[in-house]
Image (tube, rainbow, N blue to C red):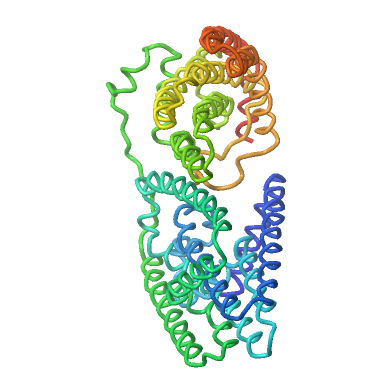
Amino acid sequence: MTGILVRLKLTLLRNGLRRSPWQVVGLVIGAVYGLGIVGMAAAGLVALRFAEAEIAHAATMVIFSIVTVGWVVLPIFVYGVDNTVDPSRFALFGLRPGQLLPGLWLAGLIGVPGVATLLVALCLIGTWSIGVLPVLAALISAVIGTLLCVLWSRSVLTWLSGMLRGRRFRDIAIVGFVVLMLAFSLGMQLVSRIGQLSPQVLLDLLHSAAAVLGWTPFGWIWGLPGAVALGHWLEVLVRLVLTAALTVGLLALWRSRLGIELTSPLDAGSGGGKVRADSFIDRLVPATPYGAVAGRTLRYWRRDPRYQVALVSLVILPVFLIVISLVNGRALNIASWSPVLIAVIGGASVGSDLAYDNSAFGLHLLSGVSGRDDRRGRVTAYLWVVTPVLVMAVIVTTAVTQAWQLLPSVLALCVVALLAGLGAGSAVSGFVPGKVKPPGSNAFSSGGGNLQSLLNLMLTSGITFVAALPTVALVVAAQFGPGWLAWIALPVAGVCGAAVLVAGIRLGGRLLDRRGPELLAAITS
């Protein structure tokens, strides 16, 4: 059964790659990125061979303990990205947990994360190539540690599977994942400033972190080769016993939950959602064809995880830039311009909105909705969503940075970027609708972007930049000349942005009327 499950995972992976050449490209890019990480990690771990044994011992425990924690935490937020060997899919085959468990365990190693982790872990051999026993301990630690990473991930995911399938958790996970990435980025910024500390302080921090992480369940096995190299044989024995107990415990927990998964009814999915006839969205938009399109798009922003990821990212973006400015000790005026980036992203996003519909766009064609109403409706929805976020971002960033003199310039750039971006995206999507992840897919899964999406973004951004040139010129002149030029930039931005918006809606509407079936085929292929 173990061999069958491993071959099944390989077959599903191969068939997935055959289905779309872009998945092959994505896999190649992921493999190249993974090999780059492996190469840098290998160089660092081999370099530790020439450091003192105590330093290498502490450094390897900290590094690989964090890697193990990543195996536990990250799959929770991206649950559903890889469910090719989901235990619930075997519920009808009458299999026992013991038959599936070894195969599922080894199948978890198949993929870029598993292979990259194993290769990096094997670089411990280079770190501890100072004797036969340390090398043997490093090999054992690498193999068992990698298997434990997969075991941690699989057992935790299996136990939380019931909760992870729920829609409420997915909504929370979206926010949590974006916040986690923000915290990671800020952490990397703080790490980049560690170099300013004295070597002795750095060593003290390293040993303190190793003393904590090395004796958690995530670090027991990773401290084995260092303990052997230092001749701490009691520590070696303790770590081996603890690792064995941990492995048995995780297998027992996984096996017990696996038995429940194999004997539980198949998840029929959530349903029964109702849309009230007199909801807030219905009162927000007019009872017209374009109002119906706007209302449906607004509901997408509330219900579709793909939209929620974009919205949370827009909200967190100014906070991230402010904190980065504080960490790096730069002038906070840099963060004052962050709302402009929100306007650029928010405006350009409408260019891929048609692709988010997927086959649902066929309802527009069948119901006879005009292309102009479609364009107006989507633009209206984006204005309702992005404008409040943009206003709050301008208020918060200006209040925090106290850069009130930049307020008219920031407002002018935000206005032209948002309006021109919406107009350009409305027109460009009539030529190149882009490709996104299909409805119902995990918001963090791969497979959404390709050259078509890149072309969509480049055209939209290019048109927006050209439309914003007069405003940009006035803003730049205001920074180096009389400040009143920034106030002139405001009406100029409104006129230029509105002109592109109106022209984009009209051109995009005509293109949708003429190329509707072709666009439907493009976004559903």
* Residue located at (58% from left, 16% from top): 475
Q: Examine the image and state in which quarter residue 390 appears.
A: top left
* Residue located at (48% from left, 42% from top): 326
* Residue 455 relative to residue 213: left or right: right
* Residue located at (34% from left, 22% from top): 281
Image coordinates for residue 465, horizontal then vertical, percent: 65, 20
- Foreground residue, 120 or 249? 120
- Foreground residue, 294 or 470? 470
- Foreground residue, 166 or 174? 174
Q: In this view, does 159 lie above or below 497?
A: below
* Residue located at (52% from left, 49% from top): 185
- Asked whether the viewer can see residue 297, the reply is no
Image coordinates for residue 182, horizontal then vertical, percent: 48, 46
Q: Examine the image and state in which quarter residue 381 appears.
A: top left
Image coordinates for residue 503, horizontal then vertical, percent: 60, 9
Q: In this view, does 320 lie above or below 180?
A: above
- Foreground residue, 143 or 398? 398
Image coordinates for residue 59, horizontal then vertical, percent: 56, 71
Number of numbered markers: 0
Q: In this view, does 89 lie above or below 423?
A: below
Q: In this view, does 384 lie above or below 177?
A: above
* Residue 78 relative to residue 523: left or right: left
- Asked whether the viewer can see residue 4, the reply is yes
Q: Dividing the image into 4 quarters, which one contains the N terminus?
A: bottom right
Q: Dividing the image into 4 quarters, which one contains the C terminus?
A: top right
